Image (cartoon, grey):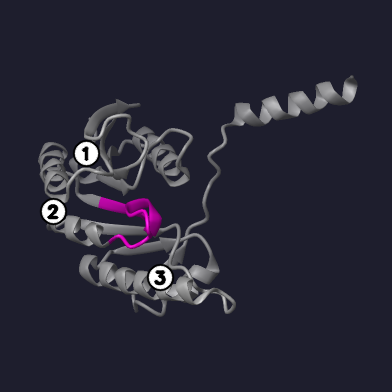
Amino acid sequence: MKESNKKILFICGSLGNGNDGVGDYTLTLAKQLDKMGHNISIIALNDKYLSQNNYIKENIADINILRIHHTLHISAKKSLIKSFLTLHNPRFISLQFVPFAFQNKGLPINLLFLLNSFEDLKWHIMFHELWAGMEINDSYRLKILGYLQKKIIHYLIFKLQPFAIHTSNTLYIHQLKKVTKLYVSKLPLFGNIEKNEYISVDSDKKKNSES
């Protein structure tokens, strides 16, 4: 039996299989943690790959999943989240953050409101992307967007006070130091391509070289 103190909830934007890189990463990581004895659940808060404009509940490889359509009103999302939390009672939450995953224009203000639904839980944040306009030659429009995104990320960290923050590269660690004094660790990303896909590619190359 899986221990209650190993209950982990992942939050991402979408879970369209093969359509969303962060969603694929989240599900792959969740499957591995499940094999290690953790009790895993996932909420896709802003799913763009649902055929219906409501929500669905799934169970994939013993992982309980709630996928919420991106057009659903925030009050309905809050109700679904609270019911899902009551049912699965996670101890830790891992937010897989990409600005555009939670809002089409990259300004996930609604995410900040939805976080009020999660109380007394320990947070982890994985920043897959940060804000726009980091390059000197970026347009004025991108720099304004980046300024607003930076403010949202600053408030997000301040509000959640995560016990751990990760990101995938050194540049992002340097940038995050501008918005928080909390320690940020580097967590390299693993690939989403299965081994049999590599074998298939190698086999095709071999066949082409022989012909």
| x and y percentages locating residue 69 in the rendered image | 27, 39
Amino acid, disc 2? Ser
Element carrying mark 1: loop
The residue that mark 3 highlights is 145
Element carrying mark 2: helix
| x and y percentages locating residue 39 in the rendered image | 26, 37
Mark 1 against mark 2, which lies toward the viewer? 2
Which region shows up in magenta?
Answer: 93-108
What is the quadrant of residue 123 in the picture?
bottom left
The residue that mark 2 highlights is 117
Which residue shows up at 52% across the image and 51% down it? 189
Is the C-beta separation of discs 3 and 2 under 8 Å? no
Q: CA distance from mark 3 to mark 2?
A: 27 Å
Mark 1 against mark 3, which lies toward the viewer? 3
Is the C-beta separation of discs 1 and 2 under 8 Å? no
- Is the residue marked by circle 1 packed among few (<14), some (14-19), or many (20+) residues within 10 Å? few
N-terminal of the pair, mark 1 or mark 3, is: 1
| x and y percentages locating residue 140 in the rendered image | 49, 77
Residue nearest the viewer, comparing 15 with 166: 15
* Residue 98 seen in the current view: no
Amino acid, disc 1? Glu
105 within the magenta span: yes
Q: CA distance from mark 1 to mark 2?
A: 24 Å
